[in-house]
């Protein structure tokens, strides 16, 4: 158990650091610096993973800004980017991989060896996992395992009901997924390794993490105040495990990954007293893009309705404004999904984001029928994937 607990703590620590200042400007001549520039973009390889591939020109994307983007990535202008995947009009039109530092849970700085990434290499997605959790909740509601996102959280954990704290009964699942539980939580405002003061780390070390979470004082009326809370992600994982009666990775495989043709993934889970702690998912970038496409197709894939369309509409609609936190220019937060507007050439383009530490992202642009996936290793510097999109990718699409 001690070995499992140590691994879990470090693995989940990276999730809590999503808003930590990584520092460092672009232009770093790091692990990408030896890669030669490209002169053209090849059509991605057609495999049996469910994607149809096409050229950039076939979907109306200007190749020149994309070539510039790839070369800037290789020069390190956007710090450490491991993978870039673009899907336009349902076609996979670009996948670019480079060399970089593999994530390592056993390293104090999270860095493992430099490796050459490719389309078959699993990559940790960190807090992008939250958007997968949201999707699974929608499926669980559809299948009758959970009554509604407006169900009481305490109803899932009746052993922790305290009649002397009646306000906590008003915390709904949608409050947990929108980071508006109102519970006292200290995660953004402490150092990444501050085991004494970080609620995210103390949650993981508690003998009963759910008791720790629900034992926190209620500071705000549920649904009214945003504060980033990784413990809520863990609680939703336990809600799914209890309601479905199966391990989370098994439920995910059965209800989401298998229908999407995702056969290679890793979702760590560790028994931790009476609950299970959930780690961050490892996926291929090509498979990450399928979640973005699923949102665009209102829950359908290959003619099958995998996720209720209404769920994605609710989950990706702003539940609370986050403009005051100043994180990457995000304007709102839904049910484990971020929202943002890009301004390109005077045109405002709305986007839905799954966001993870060190530069992991699924970016969805409904008006453009566009999905962009980025993976990276920016644990010690700023992740600049939004700049990459604004400077190169969106101009290439909108002309």
Image: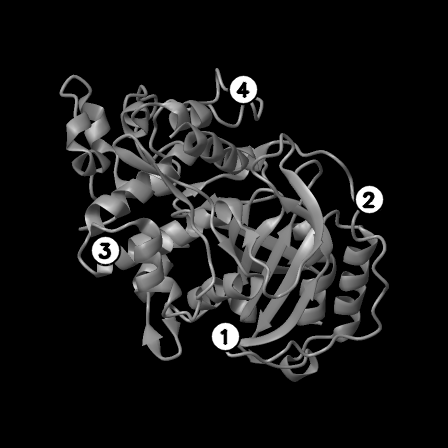
Marks 3 & 4, CB-CB < 8 Å contact = no
Q: Can see residue 36? A: yes
Say which residue appears at 21% left-offset and 60% top-offset: 143
Q: Which residue is mark 4?
A: 194
Question: At numbered mark 2, what does the secondary structure look like: helix, strand or loop?
Answer: loop
| Count of all numbered marks drawn on residues in the image | 4
Eyeballing the image, is 125 above or below 159?
below
Q: Name the secondary structure under disc 1.
A: loop
Query: What x and y, as percent, mark residue 7?
Result: 48, 34
Locate the C terminus and report the quarter of the image it occupies. bottom right
Structural distance between the alpha carbons of marks 1 and 4: 42 Å
User: Callout 3: 10 Å neighbours few (<14), some, many (20+)?
Assistant: some
Residue at position x 41%, y 48% from top? Answer: 334
Foreground label between 2 and 3? 2
The x, y position of residue 265, in whole percent, is: 46, 58
Asked whether residue 226 is in view, the answer is no
Q: Which residue is mark 1?
A: 49
**Residue 149 rendering spot, x and y as whole percentages:** 26, 48
The answer to which quarter of the image holds residue 8 is top left
**Structural distance between the alpha carbons of marks 3 and 4:** 37 Å
> What label sits on residue 28 in the rendered view?
2
Could you tell me which secondary element the residue under label 3 belongs to? Answer: helix
- In this rendering, position of residue 366 left or right of residue 272: right
């Amino acid at each position: 158990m001690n070995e499992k607990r140590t691994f879990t703590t470090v693995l989940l620590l990276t999730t809590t650091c999503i808003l930590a200042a990584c520092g460092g400007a672009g232009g770093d001549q790091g692990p990408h610096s030896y890669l030669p520039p490209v002169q053209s973009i090849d059509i991605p390889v057609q495999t049996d993973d469910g994607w149809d591939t096409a050229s950039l020109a076939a979907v109306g994307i200007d190749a020149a800004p994309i070539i510039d983007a790839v070369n800037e990535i290789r020069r390190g202008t956007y710090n450490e980017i491991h993978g870039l995947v673009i899907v336009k009009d349902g076609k996979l039109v670009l996948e670019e991989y480079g060399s970089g530092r593999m994530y390592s849970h056993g390293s104090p700085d999270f860095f493992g060896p430099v490796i050459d990434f490719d389309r078959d290499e699993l990559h940790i997605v960190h807090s992008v996992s939250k958007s997968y959790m949201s999707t699974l909740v929608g499926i669980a509601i559809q299948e009758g395992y959970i009554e509604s996102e407006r169900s009481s959280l305490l109803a899932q954990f009746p052993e922790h009901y305290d009649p002397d704290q009646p306000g906590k009964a008003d915390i709904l699942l949608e409050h947990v997924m929108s980071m508006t539980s109102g519970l006292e939580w200290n995660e953004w405002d402490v150092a990444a390794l501050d085991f004494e003061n970080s609620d995210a780390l103390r949650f993981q070390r508690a003998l009963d993490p759910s008791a720790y979470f629900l034992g926190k004082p209620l500071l705000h009326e549920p649904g009214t105040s945003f504060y980033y809370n990784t413990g809520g992600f863990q609680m939703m994982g336990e809600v799914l495990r209890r309601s479905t009666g199966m391990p989370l990775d098994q439920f995910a495989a059965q209800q989401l990954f298998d229908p999407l043709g995702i056969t290679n993934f890793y979702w760590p889970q560790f028994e931790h007293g009476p609950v299970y702690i959930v780690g961050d998912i490892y996926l291929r970038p090509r498979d990450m893009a399928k979640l973005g496409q699923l949102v665009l197709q209102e829950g359908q894939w290959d003619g099958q309705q995998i996720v209720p369309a209404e769920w994605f509409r609710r989950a990706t609609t702003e539940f609370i404004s986050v403009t005051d936190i100043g994180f990457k220019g995000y304007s709102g937060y839904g049910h484990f999904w971020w929202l943002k507007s890009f301004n390109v050439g005077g045109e405002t383009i709305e986007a839905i984001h799954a966001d993870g530490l060190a530069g992991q992202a699924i970016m969805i642009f409904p008006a453009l029928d566009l999905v962009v996936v980025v993976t990276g290793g920016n644990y010690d510097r700023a992740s600049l994937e939004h700049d990459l999109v604004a400077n190169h990718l969106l101009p290439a699409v909108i002309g």
